[in-house]
């Protein structure tokens, strides 16, 4: 009880210092452990029918997953998803890849996400992140921001922004990943 | 005392250090960083304000540490000074955001700063938007607990962030969401999915006994929501009620003096849609009455909002169609929106080789109707109930009307085009807070946009954007052209000009030219821009920030690791 009486106020007052201390120790101690690939964080988001879904459940039976953050008001995001939608069926047949488009539209336009996705005939999975919890946990600043997750649920590649033709690099990387190559430096 | 502190910390963390190898086995550190800086050049022709520092810098760095079920994070922010157009109270440097959280089975606890939203945000939303300079994080405690697969409970308590300070009020709230199909086994296979939720939020602020009115110290708000989906049909609805909340911020459209009224607040939001592959239709309606809800009753500007009232208008993404954006009127508005999206199939005569997408959207927002409460009290009189407002009556004053149609088609493997027409009626007096430059109340504008992309090769593309706005009010008419060249995935260049060609109020017409170059490598993006920026409004989610005219060089760097 005494520990609780003194520990909690101390903790709150010095929270910033404690967190910084943890980072330092981690860096010192972590030097000789092997390089590990980061995994998807466990965050609650919503499906397009408003059900709660945890991001740790994102999987594709051992095959790669592309996670792309977008919003209805983001022009390059719409261009990226349109470009992928045109070749998505071919991509799936060839590599078994799955695209999960995570919309960061807030409650102004989140109800508009499913009608827009259906209206444009897009067939990939869509998740809603209306308050940006998943976006913050993945350190996404500007959208579009796209990640490639390998068959073990590890984040192996990421890229921000989109220009016409960027989707060609994306499928190249998926092909290399399926062959077992390391794409983290590419 | 300092040595005692260090020893105490070391003692607490000693067990962790001795087991360091296994303790840190699953630990990860990730983060992100963004820098937006501008060097300002004086330009009297476009009316730039004086900037004594000559520069503005908005920058932040985020670090997140995770180790199995534990996570902690810190954000450093620097505004030395903040870019023009951001509130001057943002100036400064420090750590305004830090937290630690832990998950044990179905329980998730966060101590420190956090963001959270209840339902659509009608009575509670703590969020951040860097481009808007908005951050109302709560500093305190957040607890989330789930029961089985279908019951989700949330509890929050804390003080809101106000730039480098905290609000005087305490905010606490509770939310429960029930996924009916997951709670009752028998219903899990049913096609109709139902989600029901309810929330309660209360703020406490001490009354000032010397003040002329007796003010409630605890102000509560309640909300209930219902979401139904079945096949292609969807319904998202929420109703909120706030008890009497007399404050400086009770002002509304035509009465910016109105304050300290004892009327409760109400908000109703209904959104219905039907969609299937290639077609969707959506209808939404909203009524808001006296729902501005802040954690300090003495504040009158764009800060310390506890809730978020989503606007019901389409967010435009091109310069000229976004010139007159709608801003939510939290103390009174009645709106409708309808939208149809249709995809003409590929291979048909009308659809062309690759298909054609059409979007038609219409929205209109009016004021609510306000009546006197009795013969002797004027509408919105201070210290009274304020006014009566029949629920289904629409006010006479129109705030905003937007009709837009957008057609996009890919013609060949190399060429695609988007054409759009927008008609906007914008109540400059109410939404902009003042009359137009030519002393009128409403601005009516016709806008035409063409956006064409030509792929020179697999990775080289050229894009041309042409826009035109015609209006007889405010700043008159504009044309804009932008040429963008991209080399996927690393390079982008663009050059553009926005020209104000028809003005009756200015002596000379103005060119707003811009040149931009940028480089991207994986998660790092660098962008350099030189040129003029028109004074205007930047809006996200109905929350707006006024931007003054500027001329100069700006550099933006963003990266994550």
Image (tube, coloured by chain):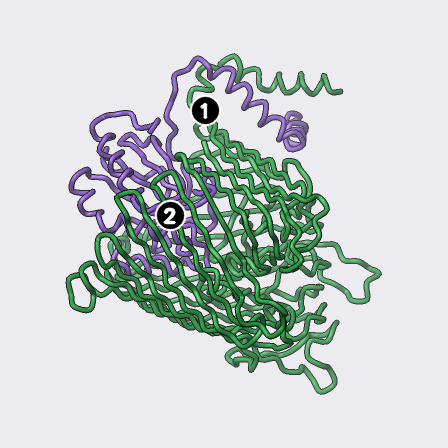
- Pointer 2 local density, CA inside 10 Å: few below 14, some 14–19, many at least 20: many
Left or right position of A149 against B346: right
Which quarter of the rendered picture does the C terminus of chain B lie within? top left
Query: How far is mark 2 from mark 1, CA to CA?
Result: 42 Å
Residue B549 appearing in the image: yes
Specify the quadrant of the image occupied by residue B43.
bottom right
- Residue at (55%, 20%) from the top-left corner? A24
- Pointer 1 local density, CA inside 10 Å: few below 14, some 14–19, many at least 20: many
Chain of the residue where label 1 is placed in the rendered structure: B
Specify the quadrant of the image occupied by residue B200.
bottom right
Residue B273 appearing in the image: no
- Residue at (41%, 44%) from the top-left corner? B492
Q: Position of residue B102 (x, y in %)?
A: 50, 33
**Does label 1 lie on the same chain as label 2?**
yes
Q: Position of residue B439 (x, y in %)?
A: 64, 76
Chain of the residue where label 2 is placed in the rendered structure: B
Which quarter of the rendered picture does the N terminus of chain B lie within? top right
Q: Mark 2 highlights which residue?
A: B485
Q: Mark 1 highlights which residue?
A: B27
Which one is nearer the viewer's eye here, B165 or B104? B165
Left or right position of A4 against A22: right
Check the image and name the residue furthest to the right. B210
Establish if A132 lies above or below B111. Answer: below
Closer mark to the observer between disc 2 and disc 1: 2
Which one is nearer the viewer's eye here, B448 or B129? B448
**Tag 2's secondary structure?**
strand
* Marked residue nearer the N-terminal end (2 or 1): 1
* Colour of chain B as rendered: green
Q: Which chain did the image draw in purple? A: A
């Amino acid at each position: 009880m005494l520990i609780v009486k003194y520990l909690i106020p101390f903790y709150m007052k010095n929270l910033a210092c404690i967190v910084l201390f943890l980072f330092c120790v981690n860096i010192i101690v972590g030097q000789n452990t092997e390089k590990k690939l980061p995994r998807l964080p466990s965050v609650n988001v919503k499906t397009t029918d408003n059900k709660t879904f945890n991001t740790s459940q994102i999987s594709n039976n051992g095959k790669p997953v592309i996670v792309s953050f977008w919003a209805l008001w983001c022009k390059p995001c719409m261009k990226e998803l349109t470009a992928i939608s045109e070749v998505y069926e071919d991509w799936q047949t060839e590599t078994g890849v799955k695209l999960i488009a995570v919309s960061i539209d807030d409650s102004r336009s989140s109800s508009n996400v499913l009608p827009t996705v259906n209206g444009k005939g897009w067939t990939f999975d869509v998740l809603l992140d209306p308050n940006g919890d998943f976006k913050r946990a993945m350190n996404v600043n500007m959208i579009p921001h796209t990640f490639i997750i390998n068959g073990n649920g590890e984040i192996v590649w990421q890229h921000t922004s989109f220009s016409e033709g960027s989707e060609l690099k994306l499928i190249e990387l998926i092909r290399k990943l399926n062959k077992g190559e390391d794409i983290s430096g590419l | 005392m300092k040595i005692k502190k260090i020893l105490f910390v070391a003692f607490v963390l000693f067990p962790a250090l001795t087991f360091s190898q296994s303790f840190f086995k699953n630990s990860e550190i990730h983060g992100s960083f963004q820098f937006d800086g501008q060097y300002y050049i004086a330009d009297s022709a476009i009316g730039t304000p004086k900037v004594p520092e000559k520069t503005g810098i908005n920058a932040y760095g985020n670090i997140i540490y995770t180790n199995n079920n534990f996570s902690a994070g810190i954000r450093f922010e620097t505004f030395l000074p903040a870019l023009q157009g951001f509130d001057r109270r943002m100036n400064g440097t420090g750590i305004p955001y830090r937290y630690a959280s832990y998950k044990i089975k179905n329980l998730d606890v966060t101590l420190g700063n956090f963001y959270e939203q209840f339902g659509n945000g009608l009575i509670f939303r703590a969020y951040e938007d860097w481009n808007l300079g908005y951050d109302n994080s709560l500093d305190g405690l957040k607890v989330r607990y789930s029961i089985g697969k279908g019951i989700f409970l949330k509890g929050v308590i804390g003080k809101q962030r106000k730039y480098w300070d905290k609000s005087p009020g305490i905010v606490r709230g509770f939310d429960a969401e029930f996924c009916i199909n997951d709670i009752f086994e028998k219903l899990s296979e049913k096609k109709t999915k139902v989600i029901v939720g309810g929330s309660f939020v209360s703020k406490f602020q001490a009354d000032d006994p010397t003040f002329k009115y007796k003010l409630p110290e605890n102000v509560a708000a309640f909300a209930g929501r219902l979401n139904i989906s079945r096949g292609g049909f969807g319904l998202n609805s929420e109703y909120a009620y706030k008890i009497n909340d007399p404050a400086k911020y009770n002002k509304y459209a035509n009465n910016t003096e109105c304050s300290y009224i004892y009327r409760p607040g109400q908000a109703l939001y209904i959104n219905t849609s039907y969609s299937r592959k290639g077609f969707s239709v959506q209808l939404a309606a909203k009524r808001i009455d006296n729902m501005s809800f802040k954690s300090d009753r003495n504040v009158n500007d764009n800060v310390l909002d506890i809730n978020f009232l989503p606007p019901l208008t389409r967010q435009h993404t091109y310069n000229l169609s976004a010139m007159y954006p709608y801003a939510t009127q939290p103390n009174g508005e009645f709106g409708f929106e309808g939208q149809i999206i249709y995809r003409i199939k590929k291979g048909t005569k009308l659809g062309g080789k690759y298909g054609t997408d059409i979007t038609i959207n219409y929205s209109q927002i009016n004021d609510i109707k306000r009546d006197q409460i009795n013969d002797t009290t004027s509408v919105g009189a201070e210290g009274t109930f304020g006014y009566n407002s029949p629920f289904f009556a629409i006010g006479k004053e129109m705030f905003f009307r937007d009709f837009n149609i957008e057609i996009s088609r890919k013609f060949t493997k190399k060429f695609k085009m988007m054409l759009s027409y927008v008609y906007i009626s914008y109540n400059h007096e109410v939404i902009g807070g003042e009359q137009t430059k030519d002393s009128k109340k409403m601005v009516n504008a016709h806008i035409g946009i063409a956006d064409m992309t030509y792929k020179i090769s697999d990775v080289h593309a050229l894009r041309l954007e042409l826009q035109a706005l015609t209006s007889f009010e405010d700043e008159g008419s504009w044309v804009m052209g932008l040429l963008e060249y991209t080399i996927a995935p690393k390079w982008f260049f663009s050059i553009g000009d926005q020209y104000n060609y028809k003005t009756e109020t200015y002596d000379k017409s103005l060119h707003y030219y811009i040149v931009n170059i940028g480089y991207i490598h994986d998660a790092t993006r660098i962008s350099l821009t030189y040129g003029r920026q028109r004074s205007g409004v930047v809006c996200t989610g109905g929350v707006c920030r006024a931007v003054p005219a500027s001329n100069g060089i700006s550099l933006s760097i963003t990266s994550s690791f």
